[in-house]
Image (cartoon, helix red, strand yellow):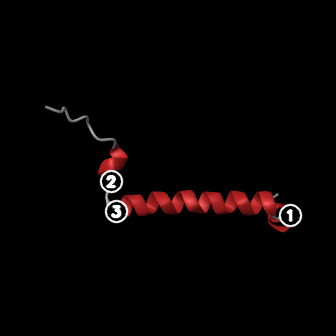
Amino acid sequence: MTTMLPLDPIEKASRDELVALQFDDRFKWTLRHAYENSSGVSAQVR
């Protein structure tokens, strides 16, 4: 007999919630990458 462990909130998330999280992570990565790798973007932000 196996005992079921409770699911983490992310494992119960709806598709819309997962898409929103994925967009947020990609957006943050893109901004960070542009800031760190483009002197033009870095200058505009400062």
Report helix, strand or loop for mark 1: helix
Which label sits on residue 15? 3
Q: Could you give the CA–CA distance between mark 3 and mark 2, rounded to whole angstroms? A: 7 Å
Q: Mark 2 or 1 closer to N-term? A: 2
Quadrant in the picture for the C terminus: bottom right
State the residue in front, 3 or 16: 3
Q: Amino acid at mark 2?
A: Ala
Residue beneath label 1, please? Answer: 39
Q: Is residue 28 left or right of residue 14?
A: right
Residue 4 vertical position relative to residue 26 in the rendered view, above or below: above
Q: Are marks 3 and 1 in contact (CB under 8 Å)?
A: no
State the residue in front, 35 or 4: 4
Q: Could you give the CA–CA distance between mark 2 and mark 1, rounded to whole angstroms? A: 38 Å
Which label sits on residue 3? none
| Residue 25: x %, y % from top left | 55, 57
Q: Could you give the CA–CA distance between mark 3 and mark 1, rounded to whole angstroms? A: 37 Å
Label 2 Cα neighbours within 10 Å, binned few <14 / some 14-19 / many ≥20: few
Farthest residue, direction bottom: 40
Q: Which residue occupies 29% across, 41% down? A: 7
State the image quarter where residue 42 is shown: bottom right
Q: Amino acid at mark 3?
A: Arg
Label 1 Cα neighbours within 10 Å, binned few <14 / some 14-19 / many ≥20: few
Label 3 Cα neighbours within 10 Å, binned few <14 / some 14-19 / many ≥20: few
Tally the numbered discs. Answer: 3
Report helix, strand or loop for mark 2: loop
Q: Is residue 4 left or right of residue 23?
A: left
State the image quarter where residue 4 is shown: top left
